[in-house]
Amino acid sequence: MAYVVTDNCVDCRFTDCVEVCPVDCFYLDNEKNMVLIHGDECIDCGACEPACPVEAIYAGDDLPADKRHWEKTAIERIKGAGLKLITESMDPLPTADAKKANLGL
């Protein structure tokens, strides 16, 4: 099962995960201020999960019940909103460090 980016990424958008992805399956969602993983392109390597400094990424099988909707959100946003594939890291959003601190990380 593919990896899933969840709400911890909203308003931070660290892209360390993008740098380690061997198949380029991350898409930029400017409306939600985050990145999303395309589930059909993810090869389940797991490289992205430990790279995320805000613990926003989960293996699909390990998603907590309250975060399951992020699988569907990714599919809908990537396909429906025509999100742009990103293959290189970007600067985090100005709110990233505050978000990380609020999460206690």
Image (spheres, helix red, strand yellow):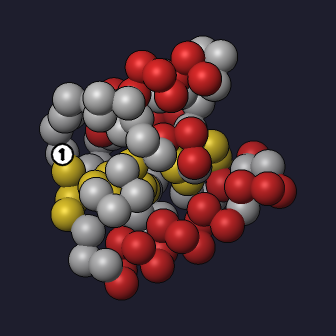
Task: State which quadrant residue 77 falls in.
Answer: bottom left
45 or 16, which lies in front? 16
11 or 36, which lies in front? 11
Q: Position of residue 33 (x, y in %)?
A: 36, 50
The answer to whether residue 104 of the structure is visible from this angle is: yes
Up/down of 7 relative to 73, above or below? above
The residue that appears at 20% across and 50% down in the rendered structure is 86
The residue that appears at 60% across and 23% down in the rendered structure is 102
Q: Position of residue 101 (x, y in %)?
A: 55, 17
The residue that appears at 25% across and 77% down in the rendered structure is 82
Residue placed under numbered mark 1 in the picture = 87
Quadrant where the C terminus is found in the figure: top right
60 displayed left or right of 83:
right
Quadrant where the N terminus is found in the figure: bottom right
86 displayed left or right of 47:
left
Q: Tag 1: residue type?
A: Thr
49 or 96, which lies in front? 96
The answer to whether residue 25 of the structure is visible from this angle is: no
